[in-house]
Amino acid sequence: MYRISDQQVDFILADIKKHGIRIESLQQNLLDHICIIIEQNLEQHDDFEKFYREIIKTFYKEELKEIEEEAIFLVKSKGPFLLLSRLQFFLLLFITFIGPYITYDLVWFFNEGHGSVLPVEVWSGTMVFATFPLLVLLVLYFTPEKLDPLIPRKSKILLGIRPFIKIIPPTEKYASYQQ
Amino acid sequence: MIYSSELIKGTLKTIVLKLLTDNKKMYGYEITQKVKELTLDRIQITEGALYPTLHALEAEGLVTIKTEFIGKRVRKYYSLSRAGKTKAKEKLNELSNFMETMISLLDIKPKTI
């Protein structure tokens, strides 16, 4: 059986950290797991670093830090939550920020009758208070490339108690929350 | 036949809790090997799925941890906490009921292995 040296342990740990694993508990687990695989499969004359590079690739799809992202996601996303698409999220923002002004105008209009005209203080109030949020929403929605990674295209938005809001980029795993 | 990761993902927590019920303490690599052995290689738990799950179980207080130094590295042994033992029973009952419902829903005939 191959005997892994202290220098090799340090090398693996440094590489794990370099590739985005910051949680110590995960570092320790991954380090031990990798060391066991190496000790059980590597021969004395084999190239340690080459073998390590090959096995570490089997731990992830795109990047090693996916493991930490998934761990954080599982811990933080407890309790009731709502998973929205990008479009649904912007519709929700629209309803929240613009909806009250439009509703007020419509209620006023229907109360006063069809022939009446909205007084200037009502529609100008709507313009002043609704225009700015509307412009911000439109810019955010239609230019995700420029504002990326604020709310990237194809991202999902998690609304819940813990966390209150979380933007999930397309690469991050959220499949377990779609069940 | 190796089962899809989607199927395994929904049951991983239950699998880990059940293994820790049957075995007093286990470490990550041991869990992956035990699952392979018990399922004749049909379920292979990936590191990318196992360690986030163990981390979440730890955060929820369902497992307790003891560490052991193997040379310069640390091995983390997981055991069920009292809350974990209760949770394991709940999850097993839930999965058992779910499987019965799926068998009935999909009209699956039980087959002998």
Image (cartoon, coloured by chain):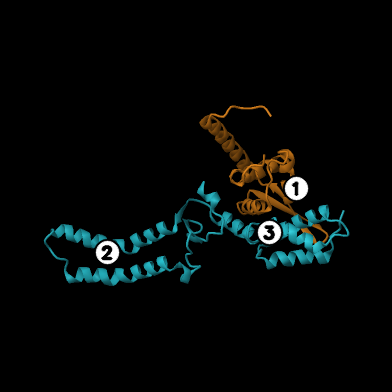
Chain colours: A cyan, B orange
Query: In the rendered image, which quarter is residue A49 located in?
Result: bottom right
Q: Earlier in the sequence, mark 3 or mark 2?
A: 3
Q: Dot 1 corresponds to which residue?
A: B30
Q: Which chain hosts label 3?
A: A
Q: Secondary structure at mark 1?
A: helix
Query: In the rendered image, which quarter is residue A55 located in?
Result: bottom right
Question: From mark 1 to mark 2, how far is it between C-alphas?
Answer: 60 Å
Residue A13 x %, y %:
74, 64
- Classed neighbour count for the residue bearing mark 1: other residues with Cα under 10 Å, few (<14), some (14–19), many (≥20): some
Q: Dot 3 corresponds to which residue?
A: A26
Depth order, front residue of A130/B88: A130
- Classed neighbour count for the residue bearing mark 3: other residues with Cα under 10 Å, few (<14), some (14–19), many (≥20): some
Q: Which chain hosts label 1?
A: B
Residue B25 shows in the view: no
A78 versus B94 height, above or below: below
- The lab-note entry on whether marks 1 and 3 share a chain reads no
- The lab-note entry on whether marks 1 and 2 share a chain reads no
Amino acid carrying label 3: it is Leu
Q: Dot 2 corresponds to which residue?
A: A101
Amino acid carrying label 2: it is Tyr
- The lab-note entry on whether marks 3 and 2 share a chain reads yes
Residue A123 x %, y %:
21, 68
Residue at the image point whose x is 74% and y is 43% from the top: B34
